[in-house]
Amino acid sequence: MSSSSSSFQMGQLVADKHVRYVLMSEKKKESFESVVMDHLRMNGAYWGLTTLDLLDKLGSVSVDEVISWLMTCQHESGGFAGNTGHDPHVLYTLSAVQILALFDKLDILDVGKVSSYVAGLQNEDGSFSGDIWGEVDTRFSYIAICCLSILKCLDKINVEKAVDYIVSCKNLDGGFGCTPGAESHAGQIFCCVGALAITGSLHHVDKDLLGWWLCERQVKSGGLNGRPEKLPDVCYSWWVLSSLIMIDRVHWIDKAKLVKFILDCQDLENGGISDRPDDAVDIFHTYFGVAGLSLLEYPGVKAIDPAYALPVDVINRILLTKGTQMVF
Amino acid sequence: MHGRPRKAYKPEEEAASAAKAVKLRSLQNQFMSNHHAKIYTKEAIDLSTKLLEINPEAYTAWNYRKLAVEDALSREESNQDLVKSVLDEELKVVESALRQNFKSYGAWHHRKWVLSKGHSSVGNELRLLDKFQTLDSRNFHAWNYRRFVVELTNRSKEDELKYTEDMISKDFSNYSAWHNRSVLLSSLLAKAEGFMPNEKIPDEYQLVHDAIFTDEDDQSGWFYHLWLLDQTVNVETPLLTSSWPSHGSCINLSGGAGCLNDSSSSKLTTSCSESGSFPLILYFNQAVGGVSSSTVTVDSELRGNEDLVWEPVSNKNSRVSSVWVARLKYMSSEPCFPKEYTVKVRIGNSPGIVSSRGCNFSTPYEFVFTAHVHDTVREDSQEVAVSWTDGFDIWDAQSKDLNFLVNLDQQMGLKWRQEAIEEEIELFRALSDSKIGKLTLARLLMAKAMISENGVKGVHYEEILELYNDLMVLDSSHYHYYKDEHSVALLHKVTSSTESLSRHLFRYRDMNNSVCLRLNNLSLSRIASVEKLLFVQMLDLSHNELHSTEGLEAMQLLSCLNLSHNRIRSFSALDSLRHLKQLRVLDVSHNNIGEHSVDTTRYLCSSPLSNSEWTEDEVGRQMTSLVTKYWDAYFVLRDLNLKQLDIAGNMIAGDEFYTLVPQVVPTLVWLNGHRVRS
């Protein structure tokens, strides 16, 4: 156990170190780890930038630099790729839209074009493909619904059918899988519950049944796993926690123990957060750790919206107003 | 990204990594230029193979390969051998990518895509799956792929069921196998061809016992067991659980805007409704749709009730609910002299009521009640605010007054259900030292109480409550889960007999002897048994631990609600109250409204955030910034026609909020005990 962590009873969030870690990762493009994840840089940018905003340090980056790179990732179809030159996919289209939302720069988009790309990926049965190659997964249902809701174009898809498809992926344990009949998994559950939340359809969720399945993800160490008999992982502090919050069952876990687990996963010297204590850190887990702490109301971290995975002030600004005019 | 130990880079490691990076970067660049130039030569394709070997997550490379395959097939479609070799090559590449990372979405999807081009033998695919499932029996990609292959080849559900049994007997700690088994079995049970619940379910209990008792911490069998319990206790067919008014009851209605003071009467008195109507409430055992004037007929002499409009008591997007309401008009323009009307309600005479799982309400049910319409007496009843402490009389309620539950004399196949539960109870009693042992026993005892035919339920509740108390200590991480279950059991106990319920019932003189239920100071953290409380007009839930009003929406007669001294954190938590059209008095003082940055009921409240339909109004236009800041208070309060509101003792309660409230609630007369309007 490192000497720094023993001096605090509860541990402490080394926010400044994490900010530095995020800013450094953005620059370090030529390590092997970075090159091998080149194709998902758009996701990485979303994780890093949202972490900065949650720690109130979004101002440390150059908005123009990020946005000009971001726009080079847009394809003629309207969708965004994971990085310049790669093929478009909804995964990266959502991250691009989320990044622009953070910067309050959604107006630079040709909203019609992007929304048509996303809406065009809805299938007959209400499901969504990730791209033109046809992989179907409830992750993509969430992505489409989240993205179109932020762009205020939800009416471009058949919402009822989209909801029906998600409900068809509901399992007997109350959870959701990636396709009908697939095993419940916390990541898929977040996607399905989030999509149902955004479309005002949470009445389809058996909150008590799912709530019990979710709260039993908390293991003895205080961390959360993603499904029964698996190891705890900081990223589930987001997937499980936000799902519990959306269905109002978060009081069924021990929040203090989870805070301690997340804090124990920090690299107190170099910054960054890992999946488990003493493992290698990365931007993915740094984001989910900070986002989890936000949901646990840790001081010094801005509130994050559990359905859209963006700060509450960003979502309220977008959804409770209409462009420059208040929606009322 | 997962499971790599944290360690500082040594300079030689860093140099090696940089060299690898340069190589990979060059490979990627070459690949990209081939892809953009649409070059599909053997050399170019081999390059992509190399790239995918190092990095199976490079999704653009999988896309490229599909384009290369399509290109080859379009040129060689007549040459069957060549086509086969092209597709074979793809399968090889996928297999080697999966060896690198058997969780690669791109690789698995590519394989499915190749198969969809019409190739490969099933035998091959199942063999490949066996390899992967031996390596990792929880790999959900493999299980998903298995389902894909099974569908493609029409393998029987029975065969697949046997497969899950094999997996489970090899290692019971295989949640994935239990999950698949539940999917197959529920489909086979629904078809009921040789798979009868009364035989199969008891067998399954036997199968899952090993999984539960071998390692008390292993969760693999827990959820399967819970599902079996649900199959044992819950009937598929929708049934009516309770109604208001109930069968054989007699209700009093006042014929005008004033109220008749009838303190001598021991009968229930409804508070006079300004709308001249009363709610007819149907409470089903599960969510149903299709309740309308065609599927529910109401016969009476009360005029103006042809084509009743039935509404589901649920959020705006839902056309299904376990609670349905219609309003029956009873006012007439004729001079009112006391009149008695008989009302006959028939449910399910014509088909149309269907559960959300597609099951029909099959057995028609009928109930009859009487309505007394009294003389109009003008009385100004709003001179004084409603008090929660003074003006109450004990109500000595009799059985016949509280007989609201529908008689379930046609419960299907009760015997095997009761036997199965008894056996499980016996087994778990013997092994109830572990957390799962105690929790399951508590659930079994609750289940037994629910499917009991007679009222001999009192005995078990103490045991259930004790089990939950034990669990709060034994498994303190989940303390609040057990607390909620404890509250549910407590409310079941309180409402289980006339005797226990009547100890909590009073009548409020100043409001026409309205029935008041007092459930204060009971440490309740959640609401339950509402189907037995539809007759309640005033509800005192003060001094408890409630954080939401979830469940109260069915109590359509509620006019006064006291939630002071609870743990309500936001107005969004009170969303269910928007369904209570008769609510006039609300006390939420001394709660935690405005204290927390995280709102756990944000998406359980209809608002623009959940894309719900709503209409603009003047207040929203005039007080925009306040309305945006207090959006949930705005949406909830504007749907209530409150006369009296108490919100002191909450962080949100301050001058700024107080300027908003009377605007959003134009009917408000009393705020925190002071007049705001005359």
Image: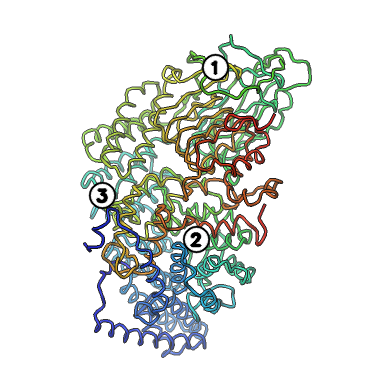
The reply to whether discs 2 and 3 touch (Cβ–Cβ < 8 Å) is no
Disc 3, SS: loop
The reply to whether discs 3 and 1 touch (Cβ–Cβ < 8 Å) is no
Letter of the chain that mark 3 sits on in the rendering: B
**Mark 1 or 2: the one toward you:** 1
Residue B391 is marked as 1
Provide residue B501's location: percent of width, then percent of height: 44, 20
Q: Which badge, 3 or 1, comes first in the chain's sequence?
A: 3
The kind of residue on which mark 1 rests is Gly
Q: Using the rendered image of the protein, determine whether residue B448 is visible from the camera's viewpoint.
A: yes
* Frontmost residue, B355 versus B279: B279
Per the model, the C-alpha gap separating discs 2 and 3 is 35 Å
> Quarter of the image holding residue B268?
top right
| In this view, B480 is above or below A1 | above
Image side of residue A185 versus residue B673, left or right? left
Provide residue B27's location: percent of width, then percent of height: 39, 87
The kind of residue on which mark 3 rests is Asp
> Quarter of the image holding residue B4?
bottom left
Per the model, the C-alpha gap separating discs 1 and 2 is 51 Å
Residue A310 is marked as 2
Q: Which residue is mark 3?
A: B218
